Image: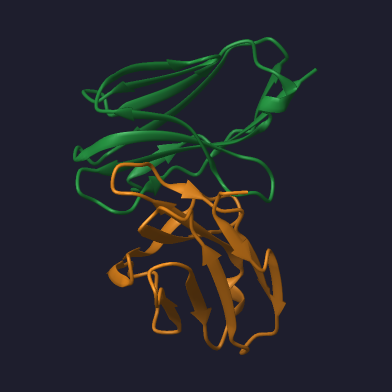
Chain colours: A green, B orange
Amino acid sequence: QKEVEQDPGPLSVPEGAIVSLNCTYSNSAFQYFMWYRQYSRKGPELLMYTYSSGNKEDGRFTAQVDKSSKYISLFIRDSQPSDSATYLCAMSATGANNLFFGTGTRLTVIP
Amino acid sequence: DTGVSQNPRHKITKRGQNVTFRCDPISEHNRLYWYRQTLGQGPEFLTYFQNEAQLEKSRLLSDRFSAERPKGSFSTLEIQRTEQGDSAMYLCASSSPTSKQYFGPGTRLTVT
């Protein structure tokens, strides 16, 4: 079993829809949770960063962490065609140097 | 541009050849990471430098792989005797002790 599980999709939504992306994990030592956006043939771009449990909002993006369920989510409101990309969840433990990534969910927002 | 840069962006090589990639981190970042990403997968950690010291290596980093960061600035990743299974995107990231990891655009390796 992988340490981080993520539905690879693909996921297609109409412009303006609310998008929900999710990851589950098995390592209870993970304390830092991130969402990266990756356009085709580009490097990952950091979108959201959360420490421990709770919610964090930044513009149209909201990240949620539920450590009791080992479940994290990213919500995108009023989705735009420019949001079309692969979304990667990533996490790490305190004092660890490496990130553990999910497989990524490919999102397409249709105009 | 003050982000992480990587060169070359794409490398095509024949099986058995050696290849070397370069990463220039964000200038104030003393931590540097290499990851490998294959098609349809998330990045997988390869190795980590703090300044010039290589402090952590994944078991994915076989003895054909070597990474250096001689002056604590740029880093190189060399793959000797390339195999078709080495075809992947090689990503470099950098961070400071208090910042998150920021990734470069990657070097796409194709081994024919």
Residue A71 spot, x, y in % from top left: 33, 26
- Residue B111 visible, this angle: yes
Q: In which quarter of the image is residue B55?
A: bottom left
The quarter of the displayed image where residue A9 is located: top right
Q: Which residue is drawn at 56% across and 53% down?
A: B104
Residue A2: image location, x then y, percent: 36, 48
Q: Nearer the viewer, residue A20 or A1?
A: A20
- From the viewer's side, name the closer residue of A54 and B31: B31
Position above or below: B29 against B12: above
Task: Give x and y (percent) for residue B65.
Answer: 45, 79
Q: Front-most of A9 and B88?
A: B88
Query: Where does the C terminus of chain B fall, quadrant-wise?
Result: bottom right
Q: Is residue B112 visible?
A: no
Q: State the residue in front, A13 or B13.
A: B13
Q: Residue at horizontal 69%, vertical 10%?
A: A16
Position of residue A22 in the picture relative to residue A78 (left or right): left
Q: Is residue B39 above or below residue B80?
A: above
Indicate whether B23 appears above or below A22: below
The correct choice, above or below, for A80 with respect to B16 in the image is: above
Residue name at image x 32 percent, y 23 percent: A65
